[in-house]
Image (cartoon, grey):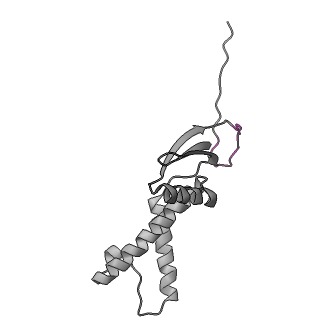
Amino acid sequence: HTSNFSFLLRTHDNCINISTTMLATNDYNDYHFRQQVESALSKIETILDTTRNPRYAEEKDHTYNDKFGLAEFLTNTAMAAQANALERLGLDNEIFKKMQSLSAKDKRSVTLRFISEESCDFVKEQTVDVESKHEFIKETEEVKT
């Protein structure tokens, strides 16, 4: 399964078209993500001294200043995630620099528009015999007329 993406970088009077192809990946899995966080928290607990006890922010009382630090940390994390997602779609440092220079030159925002086209090709058909306690045999009778 492949996807073709086109990116249009637009400013007031400039337009750049960039195309790339990538293989499709699995969708986001909240349960899997939470399991990874739980595993990481478990490992962190063994590393940190006994006075620390990492938890999800929603489960822990915290001070007002902690909220600003947490908001800043999460904003930076979200920005890094967005940059990684765009990089995964095919935008590299050269394109990011071009976007930045267009924005600085025109003193306007740069619009990034995604256009995608998906295709799916049949690769092969494979029959596999799997060992089991039960065997099912399908019989068909041919009637000649």
Choose between 122 and 107: the one closer to the eye. 107
Q: Is residue 124 magenta?
A: yes
List x then y, in percent, for residue 94.
63, 58
List x then y, in percent, for residue 144.
69, 10
Range of magenta residues:
123-135
Would you say residue 89 is visible in this rendering? yes
28 relative to 16 in the view: left or right = left
Choose between 91 and 117: the one closer to the eye. 91
List x then y, in percent, for residue 56.
38, 75
Residue ID at (32%, 78%): 67
Residue 127 lies in quadrant: top right
Residue ID at (44%, 93%): 50
Residue 70 lies in quadrant: bottom left
Would you say residue 56 is visible in this rendering? no
Choose between 21 and 140: the one closer to the eye. 21
User: Which secondary structure is most common in the magenta stretch?
Assistant: loop
Q: How many marks?
A: 0
Residue ID at (70%, 44%): 129
Residue 63 lies, with reference to residue 108, above or below; the image says: below
Residue 31 lies, with reference to residue 47, above or below; the image says: above
Choose between 26 and 92: the one closer to the eye. 92
Residue 12 lies, with reference to residue 46, above or below; the image says: above
